[in-house]
Amino acid sequence: MRARMRRAVRIVCAILGVALTATGLYFLLTTEPPAALLGLAVWLGAAVVLHDGVFAPAVYVANRILARGTARLPAAATTSVRILFGIGTMLTLVVAPELVAQSRPHSNPTILVGDYALRLGAVWGVIATAAVIVILWSARRTRRRSDRLRSTRV
Amino acid sequence: MTEHGRTTRRGFLFGIGAAAAALVALTAGQSFGVLSPLNLFGPRRQGAGPQSLPVNRTAEQAKVSSRALDPSWRLKVVDGPSTHEYSREHLLALQQSEAELPIACVEGWSTDASWRGVRLRDLLASVAAPLDSAVRLTSLEPKGHYRVTTMGPEFAHDPRTLVALNVNGEPLDLDHGFPARIIAPGRPGVLQTKWLSTIEVLR
């Protein structure tokens, strides 16, 4: 029953998704001039290149380094710590171009108005603290569970 | 969620979701007021700029300052062979209207502002332009992708479309398009022509 329900929800979601995409495509192709469509294709293509060529490899490498570092952590904490550091890596990649642009002369005082390096540092501080809390918490939980197992055996 | 050091599907999807949520939360404040206090990494900040409004392209970048500050500036409303010219004082003496409209930039930021000026449709009516006429808007800037733009009749005759002279209670800053600019609902920021020079009726 539950499996059937789940299947039905999935089918409805798929139909809705396809219908929405088709509507969007229809209006895109019927309202935009060819030059705009070409520009859009270039923009979307560049986004894919940037994601697959820069973003994904960087996150992958960070994740591999982290996999080594987290090998001896309690199993329950590993995924949470990886997600936290993945978020940190992603935000660093987003902020890096802002830091580069900020270091170069620019004549518009209303853009790049924040101290992004300081803020990124603060976010990494929050991430590190959260990681430590998660590790301590899951270590405690693991210890309690094994204690309980031992006490039931006696 | 982790089996033998490998990430499970659930863990992976949760990670993607958390990363997307974090990025939206920390940058979308440059467009959405509710998230503004969390806007740590957006390149713009709502309200940061002259008259509490960010600037996409400054007068200096557009090399338009001397022309825009020239006291002999006149807004030309052209309809075929006839041309009407308005000084800024003349425009200020006409009936003024107000509109709450955002500058919604395609760069990804958006800020609301209170605009005050002359309704474009009033100016068009003064030259007896038909209600289905589009207009061509030209800026004083010597060059730029959007120096000349076309506006369809649905925008040109909308009562909220203004030739704005003031923003947030003050005369337009030079960087916001002094002496006069266009502000219309539902148009991207680059089409809200600043340093307006000519309005041409297209019949």
Image (cartoon, rainbow, N blue to C red):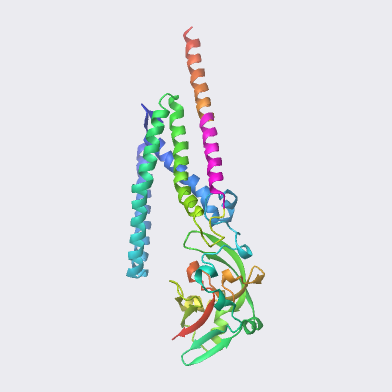
Residue B132, above or below B173: below
Quick check: can you spot residue B127? no
Residue B143, above or below A142: below
Q: In the figure, is residue B31 to the left or right of B3?
A: right
Residue B17, above or below B81: above
Give the residue displayed 49% in from the left and 50% down from the top. Answer: A99
Which stretch is magenta? Answer: A114-132
Residue B113 % position (x, y): 60, 66
Give the residue displayed 52% in from the left and 34% down from the top. Answer: A128
Residue B131 % position (x, y): 49, 83
Residue B36, above or below A31: above
The front one of B151 and B180 is B180
Residue at far bottom of view: B81
Quick check: can you spot residue B5? yes
The front one of B25 and A95 is A95
Q: Is residue B25 magenta?
A: no
Residue at far top of view: A154
Q: In the figure, is residue A45 to the left or right of B33?
A: left
Residue A129 % position (x, y): 55, 33
Which image quarter: residue B17?
A: top left
The front one of A141 and B172 is B172
Q: Image quadrant for the N terminus of chain A? A: top left
Residue B192 % position (x, y): 51, 71
Give the residue displayed 48% in from the left and 45% down from the top. Answer: B21
Give the residue displayed 46% in from the left and 75% down from the top. Answer: B147
